[in-house]
Image: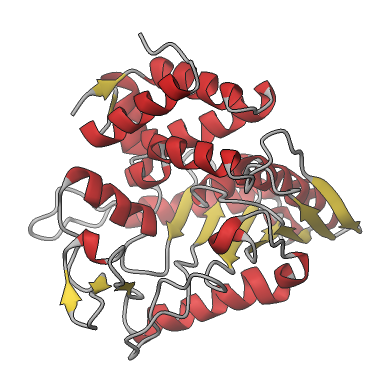
Amino acid sequence: MPTLAVDRLRLLSEQIFVAAGATRENATRVTRALVEANLAGHDSHGVQAIPHYVREVKDGRIVPTARPALLRDSPSIALVTGNWGFGHVAAEYATHVAVAKAKESNVAAVALVQANHIGRVGEYAEMAAAAGVVTIIAAGGFAEERPAVAPYGGARPVLGTNPISMGFPAGEMPSMLLDFATTTVAGGKVTLAVAKGTPVPPGALLDRHGNPTTDPKALADGGVMLPFGGHKGFALSMAVEFLGRIATGADTHHSSTHGGPVFSHSGTLIFALDPSAFQPFDQYASRADDMLRRVKAIPPAPGFSEVLVPGEPEHQSREARRRDGIPIPDSTWAAILATAEELGVTTS
């Protein structure tokens, strides 16, 4: 498994996307999202997606030059279209809109439609937290044509992985981040397990016969994913579906040519809150720091070296991988190099 320097991954990724038809601006943004996902330890949303995105561009599902725009706008509400470009570009724009409106109106809700894969949802919660804004982000609508997740108690799929993220700024302490699919493992982590030749955790998949399995290849062979936490994860997944697809009206912006079977009905809803609406921000930040420190001060249980608050594993991963490089599975690196060569991009 090669370990790649961050700068090399960024340069090669940008060159690939430009060669595939993206504007330099879009290529830089998508590259930043993918490499940052790897740095945060979420390899499932990192550079392994490069070959897939290039295929989507070739098939016309992603418009590589597209820029997002406002379809509806008011002081606290916005509807954003990604114009079927890269989802990372559109979601960043929608997040900036939500942050600006929250700072102006205290609260905001921004819906994003007509966007492809937006990547690691937690990235956008981190962006908002860095600007001092609390967010709740729900992305749904991935299963209207190709469901992958069974409901609690079911043996056939009806839902998508339906991720949710929340970001909370702090003061001296790092911001707190929640970011997870409502399945036991994210879909990209199943793909990553196939690339690595490793099993998925028990309780993550059923095979095509409805039997539990840890073989990640079972998903592509007609298997299904399962919600985490039984009925509670299923209930949260349903809530995300209502927020991300139904509340945003994503179905009315569906395309038969763009987005493909997974993203053509997808939508994302961003709730944003300026915590200074209820108290001076420095008071909020002080209390946030106090809560984080109280949790961190709890003695670790047997088998643990320390208590980690949500978002801390990502902080630690970034420090280590910026220093040591990013490990890439052999099959993933081979696929990236093959994509580059097909596009005439020099890889040496």
Please give the count of numbered marks on the rendered protein. Answer: 0
Residue at the extreme left: 302
Q: Residue at x 28, y 48 (%)?
A: 192
Q: Which quadrant would the N terminus be assigned to in this image? A: top left
Residue at the extreme bottom: 153
Above or below, 52 against 343 in this view is below
Above or below, 109 against 324 in this view is below
- Looking at the image, can residue 169 be seen? no
Q: Residue at x 77, y 71 (%)?
A: 252
Q: Position of residue 313 (x, y in %)?
A: 32, 45
Residue at the extreme right: 74
- Does residue 330 appear to the left or right of 87 in the view shown? left
Q: Residue at x 74, y 38 (%)?
A: 66
Q: Position of residue 204 (x, y in %)?
A: 26, 70
- Looking at the image, can residue 72 be seen? yes
Which of the two residues, 44 or 55, is positioned nearer the viewer here?
55
Q: Position of residue 347 (x, y in %)?
A: 38, 13
Q: Position of residue 302 (x, y in %)?
A: 8, 59
Q: Which quadrant would the C terminus be assigned to in this image? A: top left
Q: Residue at x 33, y 18 (%)?
A: 5
- Does residue 7 appear to the left or right of 287 in the view shown? left
Tell me how the rendering is colored: secondary structure
